[in-house]
Image: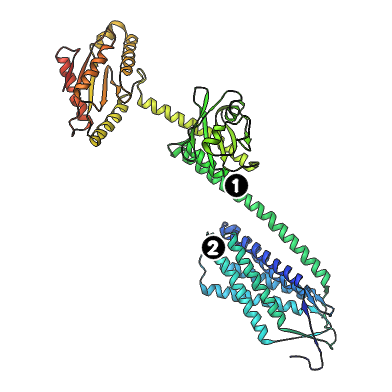
């Protein structure tokens, strides 16, 4: 295929331009794979446009690498390019990459489909290369080595197979295809594309002695113009991808934050400890090492009510200048401390107890009234929390206010459900729960448990004679005097009306009788009570135990009241 009378013209490659062209191929391949990964995670309506952008980017990168490398040719020939064939070569690369990516962007890609897509893309890329070579205008003729041309097509196939295989394996956002994985695939694709180009260039020979190649009506473009266009296109592409990538990351961060906020709001209603839920969300969203919620203890200090980690025993002052937490609570103003170890106001105990160095203090406001402080801490020094962290901490503080209000409301409702409103003693429901637990515990430990049913003697007559307010006062006085005489784990509650139930864990009937005599000694002088006592027999249930105590109480009344009967 060499002309007989034409002499062979040698050419070389500028190493610097070759390196730049390889880097360009790697960068554009990485960008294309990044967009493809984004497309596979996107909703169906946005997937196709993103795949088109990815295909155009990959095709443009392959084409750009080819022509950048062409600009690095060292030869004595004057060269220019036919614009129509240059445009056609671009179309081959872009269309081949786009169609092939669309083929492999399916939920399930078989090996056969992957090979077909790689074959199509390889032929398109080869067409790009050799159309680009045909656009080259010189004073020499070109001849080709068929074997090397075939080898370049094989290289194009494997380069396409590598790129498309990477995209297919990224489907579903696989964890093994991180940014590092995509970078490795991009480098591999860059090597493969460079191999395609230089294998193709090894197939061509230039011979002088012939007339200049006619342009056939085409428009010649100088290498300077082509280099300028390539540089401008690369700058525009990188600028667009960088801006779009930043926007995408911001949208992804926002979507992730909103998802966590939605989960926090849902969990506050579901979980028992709403305060800890907020702390866990703060650690996750703010990216701190420890989150705490401090609230006033009613005694002039702030204490830790919840953390994102292990419980923390921390108590700081709330008076002016005593602690950062106290100042933030009083002023309702956020504060960030770069190093609590050196801050004049910061409490050293916070650093010693928690091990944190930098801390963000966010006031928690309920109806514009500060009720707590949300604290985010880092074990390493942080110079600035950043706008995103500050915005998130403000939103979490609002969630914390809701959590605290709800938790306190639930606690009040539970107290109302379990506490008698007149005497402040446990009510019937609370007594049933406590007695069930006491009997179960006695069964496990083998220790006794004794109960006593108590009835205020002739209480109806007292009410009729002195009035109901005086009767209420009497019941409250009885409750207060009895509660003061009992051990911490003993229970006395209002069973109903003028009846009380006494639960004495760990004691038998003899000790219980002495306790009851002590209670009888502190009763108001104007009233007497009857007691029915029963000790658990080791087998009966709680209701049966109370039933025996009630029977003993009935017997005490039958015997004339104001006495203790052991059943």
Hey, which quadrant is residue 214 in on the image?
bottom right
Residue 535 falls left or right of residue 464: left
Q: Which mark is residue 254?
A: 1
One can see residue 225 in this view: yes
The C terminus sits in image quarter: top left
Residue 487 falls left or right of residue 381: left
Hey, which quadrant is residue 564 in on the image?
top left
Residue 437, x across and y down, in percent:
28, 32
Residue that appears at 49% across and 34% down: 403
Circle 1 packing at 10 Å, graded few (<14), some (14-19), many (20+), is few
| Rendered view: 168 above or below 417 | below
Return the residue nearer the eye: 305 or 380.
Answer: 380
Return the residue nearer the eye: 343 or 158.
Answer: 343
Indicate which disc, 2 or 1, sits on the residue closer to the N terminus. 2
Residue 565 falls left or right of residue 276: left
Look at the numbered discs 2 and 1 and tell me whether their residues touch, using CB distance below 8 Å: no
| Rendered view: 350 above or below 221 | above
Secondary element under disc 2, as helix, strand or loop, is loop
Residue that appears at 26% across and 12% down: 521
Residue 494 falls left or right of residue 346: left
Q: Provide the residue designation for mark 2.
A: 171
Residue 517, x across and y down, in percent:
23, 15
Return the residue nearer the eye: 44 or 460.
Answer: 460
Q: Which mark is residue 344?
A: none
Residue 26, x across and y down, in percent:
67, 66
| Rendered view: 489 above or below 163 | above
One can see residue 454 in this view: no
Hey, which quadrant is residue 139 in on the image?
bottom right
| Rendered view: 38 above or below 306 | below
Give the residue furthest to the top: 465
């Amino acid at each position: 295929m060499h002309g007989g009378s034409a002499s062979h013209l040698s050419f070389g490659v500028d190493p610097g331009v070759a390196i730049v062209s390889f880097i360009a191929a790697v960068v554009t391949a990485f960008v294309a794979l990044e967009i493809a990964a984004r497309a596979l995670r996107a909703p169906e309506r946005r997937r196709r446009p993103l795949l088109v952008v990815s295909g155009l980017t990959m095709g443009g990168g392959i084409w750009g690498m080819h022509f950048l490398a062409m600009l690095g040719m060292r030869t004595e020939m004057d060269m220019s390019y036919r614009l129509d064939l240059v445009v056609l070569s671009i179309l081959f690369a872009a269309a081949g990459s786009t169609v092939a990516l669309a083929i492999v962007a399916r939920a399930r890609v078989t090996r056969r489909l992957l090979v077909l897509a790689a074959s199509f893309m390889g032929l398109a890329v080869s067409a790009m290369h050799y159309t680009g070579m045909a656009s080259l205008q010189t004073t020499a003729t070109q001849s080709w080595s068929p074997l090397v041309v075939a080898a370049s097509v094989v290289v194009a196939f494997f380069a396409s197979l590598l790129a498309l295989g990477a995209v297919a394996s990224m489907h579903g956002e696989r964890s093994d295809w991180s940014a590092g994985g995509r970078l490795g695939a991009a480098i591999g694709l860059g090597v493969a594309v460079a191999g395609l180009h230089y294998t193709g260039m090894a197939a061509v020979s230039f011979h002088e002695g012939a007339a200049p190649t006619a342009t056939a009506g085409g428009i010649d473009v100088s290498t300077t113009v082509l280099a300028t266009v390539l540089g401008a296109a690369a700058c525009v592409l990188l600028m667009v991808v960088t801006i779009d990538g930043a926007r995408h990351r911001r949208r992804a961060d926002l979507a992730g934050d909103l998802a966590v906020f939605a989960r926090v709001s849902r969990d506050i209603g579901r979980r028992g400890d709403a305060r800890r839920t907020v702390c866990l969300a703060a650690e996750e969203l703010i990216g701190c090492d420890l989150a705490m919620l401090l609230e006033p203890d009613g005694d002039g200090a702030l204490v830790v009510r919840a953390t994102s980690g292990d419980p923390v025993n921390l108590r700081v002052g709330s008076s002016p200048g005593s602690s950062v937490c106290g100042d933030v609570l009083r002023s309702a103003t956020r504060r960030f401390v770069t190093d609590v170890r050196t801050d004049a106001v910061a409490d050293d105990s916070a650093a010693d107890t928690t091990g944190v160095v930098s801390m963000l203090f966010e006031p928690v406001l309920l109806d514009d009234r500060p009720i707590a402080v949300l604290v985010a801490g880092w074990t390493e020094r942080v110079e600035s929390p950043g706008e995103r962290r500050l915005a998130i901490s403000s939103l979490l503080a609002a969630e914390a206010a809701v959590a605290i209000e709800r938790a306190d409301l639930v606690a009040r409702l539970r107290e109302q459900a379990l506490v008698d409103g007149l005497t402040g003693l446990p009510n019937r429901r609370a007594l049933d729960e406590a007695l069930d637990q006491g009997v179960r515990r006695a069964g496990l430990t083998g220790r006794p448990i004794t109960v006593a049913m108590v009835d205020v003697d002739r209480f109806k007559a007292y009410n009729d004679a002195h009035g109901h307010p005086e009767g209420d006062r009497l019941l409250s006085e009885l409750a207060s005097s009895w509660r003061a005489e009992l051990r911490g784990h003993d229970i006395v509650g209002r069973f109903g009306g003028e009846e009380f139930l006494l639960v004495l864990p760990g004691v038998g009937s003899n000790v219980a009788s002495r306790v009851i005599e002590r209670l009888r000694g502190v009763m108001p002088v104007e009233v007497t009570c009857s007691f029915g006592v029963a000790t658990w027999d080791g087998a009966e249930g709680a209701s049966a135990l109370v039933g025996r105590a009630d029977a003993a109480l009935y017997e005490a009344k039958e015997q004339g009241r104001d006495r203790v009967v052991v059943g």
